Image (spheres, rainbow, N blue to C red):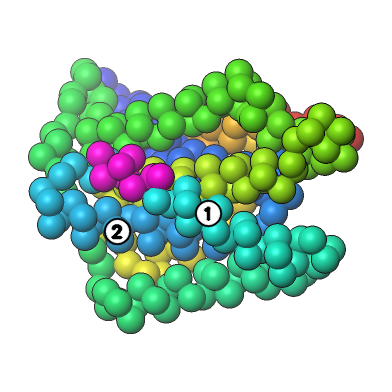
Amino acid sequence: MDPTLSLLLNGIVSGLLLGGLYAAAASGLAVSFGMLDIVNIAHPALMVAAGMAVVLVGTALGLDPLLVAVLQAPLFYLLGTLLYRAYHHFFERRGDEALQGLAFFFGVMFIVEVGLVLLLGPEQRFLDPDYAFVTWRLGEIDVPLRMLAPALLALAAIAALWVFLRRSFTGLAVAAVAQDPEALRLMAVDPVRIKRIAFGLSIALASIAGGALVVVQPIEPGSHQVFIGRVFAICIMGGMASLPGCVLAAFLFGVVENLTASFYGPSWSPAVAFGWLLLVLAFRPQGLFGRLA
């Protein structure tokens, strides 16, 4: 096979697998930012905190990091509900959720990063499961399990969330709460409770994303800074509240970024990827799967 074609095919496959990681990181934000209109800028920092917890627990107990990420997801769900309680009590119920709410989550992000540095130090941490060193070879295409396994877990978690949002009453209420909370009250549904559940789910997804991240690459307390722009860009490109759009946008973002890094160098990949975002929004301001207001 032509070397250039082989590099192209491997770049696309690696980009799709990278997109799986991006989808895991952005799907939780699609719930909080897209569906609840809560600009949780601390989401990537909580994802990194989840990854650090996965490393500690996985190392101590000898468990697979992806399994640890799933097992600790309920704890991060509870953390998410507590964060929303504080956000609602101090800001949302008083109508101060715009600027002051953003400052609240910025403070959470700063506290998480500094707390991780004080507790664990600034060093990079990682956890290599046995399959991290296994690569499947399909002709000229390499498929590393280090990236495939996290991508499959991320897609499974997103699919489960999508089914919950589409097939359950609570899930349908989540989709409606940001549009017309008064209508939910007329149906004897507490919109604050629905938002608390949805925000908890978004933080639980951060646990899955953290486990996926720590398998793919080493992390340190400041790793979230790399993901802030990417996850918000993917969420906006996908159509804000659309999980299928979020996944598709994550795949596109990963492929564009990876192909650019392969052919032109890593320094160009963020610029080209965000340029692709601007191009998409120029023709579809509502995003790939979004709807015009």
Question: Which of the labelled discs sits on residue 97, or is there none?
Answer: none
Residue placed at 69% from the left, 27% from the top?
Answer: 172
Residue placed at 43% from the left, 73% from the top?
Answer: 113
Residue 90 position, x and y percent, is 72, 69
Which amino acid type is shown beneath numbered disc 2?
A: Ala
User: Looking at the figure, which quarter contains the N terminus?
Assistant: top left
Residue 25 position, x and y percent, is 48, 46
Q: Nearer the viewer, residue 273 or 286?
A: 286
Residue 165 position, x and y percent, is 61, 27
Q: Rounded to the nearest whole Å, what is the CA distance between mark 2 and mark 1? A: 16 Å
Q: Residues within 10 Å of mark 2 (few under 14, many from 20)?
A: many
Left or right of 117? Residue 88 is right
On whether residue 71 falls in the magenta region, the answer is yes
Residue placed at 30% from the left, 61% from the top?
Answer: 52
Region in magenta: 67-74
- In this view, the residue farthest toward the front is 188
User: Looking at the figure, which quarter contains the C terminus?
Assistant: top right
Q: Nearer the viewer, residue 66 or 201?
A: 201
Dominant SS type (magenta) = helix
Q: Nearer the viewer, residue 226 or 60?
A: 60
- SS class, disc 2: helix
> Taking 45 as reference, is 140 above or below it?
above
> Taking 137 as reference, is 31 above or below it?
below
Between disc 2 and disc 1, the foreground one is: 1
Question: Which of the labelled discs sits on residue 80, or is there none?
Answer: 1
| Residue ID for mark 2 | 53
